[in-house]
Amino acid sequence: MSDKLARRNFLKLSTLGVGAVGLIVAGCDESSQAQNNNTLLIDVCCDQNTLRFQGPQGPNPNNPEGDPGPHPYYGANFVVQGVIYPGGTLANNPSGGLFADGSPEFPNDVIGRWTCRGWFTGNSEDPAFGGIFTPTGPFVTTNQVYDLDLDNPGSQMLTSDGIELIDMNTPFNRAITGGTGDRNGANGTVTQTAIGQNATFLFNFTFEFGFV
């Protein structure tokens, strides 16, 4: 599926419903735990059912009559949640992971929650093309929370901040800004890559955390 179609499907916002979703952290055997003290690999599926935005908005600038929106423009803020699977779970099916209603395809693996909040910042000079219609490059600036323990929210958590690219299969770096529990005070770099589009019409990502 093309990047343009993925972005277009992302814009079906008028019938969104809020859904509770979860996260999955990669499980490790004893032989790999030492190596993973400094790394963490996870796959994330964004759930469009949880997406909410407010602020500057309008129709599709390429088709204002046929696709009136509302769609988020430059400056609009948003929040969205999703599920995380162990790294490599989506390797053979980068468009899997969620059903259309936002329920996880692999519910027995869910152990946490991913939350992303931020702003559309693609192009301040042409706001209509600075939101979800950004054709390439950075389109949002976000904070992400990876809550890794469903039974004790906040006890095992990571956070990151930075830009996100709208381009598929293009890795980009974000700053690890903190953590709790086993990752208390975590810092380093996390590399994020959009790998596909799930059944809710939002993106799937891989994340590779490198701790220092």
Image (tube, rainbow, N blue to C red):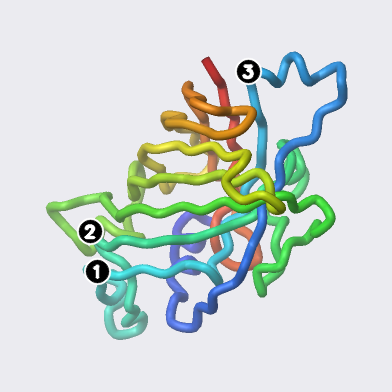
Local crowd at mark 3 within 10 Å, few (<14), some, or many (≥20)?
few
Q: Position of residue 184 (x, y in %)?
A: 54, 28
Q: Which mark is on residue 38? A: 3
Q: Which mark is on residue 55? A: 1
Q: Secondary structure at mark 2?
A: loop
The residues tagged by marks 2 and 3 sit, at their Cα atoms, a distance apart of: 36 Å
Local crowd at mark 2 within 10 Å, few (<14), some, or many (≥20)?
many
Query: Reading the chain from its start, which is encountered first: label 2 or label 3?
Result: 3
Locate residue 36: give its quadrant. top right
The residues tagged by marks 1 and 2 sit, at their Cα atoms, a distance apart of: 7 Å
Q: Residue at x 44, y 76 (%)?
A: 13
Residue 190 appears in the figure: yes
Residue 173 appears in the figure: no
Residue 97 against residue 26 in the figure, above or below: below
The residues tagged by marks 1 and 3 sit, at their Cα atoms, a distance apart of: 39 Å
Q: Position of residue 134 (x, y in %)?
A: 32, 54
Q: Is residue 165 left or right of residue 62?
A: right
Q: How many marks?
A: 3
Task: Report the residue marked by disc 2.
Answer: 75
Q: Secondary structure at mark 3?
A: loop
Q: Residue at x 32, y 78 (%)?
A: 70
Q: Are marks 1 and 2 in contact (CB under 8 Å)?
A: yes
Q: Residue at x 52, y 68 (%)?
A: 50
Q: Position of residue 87 (x, y in %)?
A: 71, 36
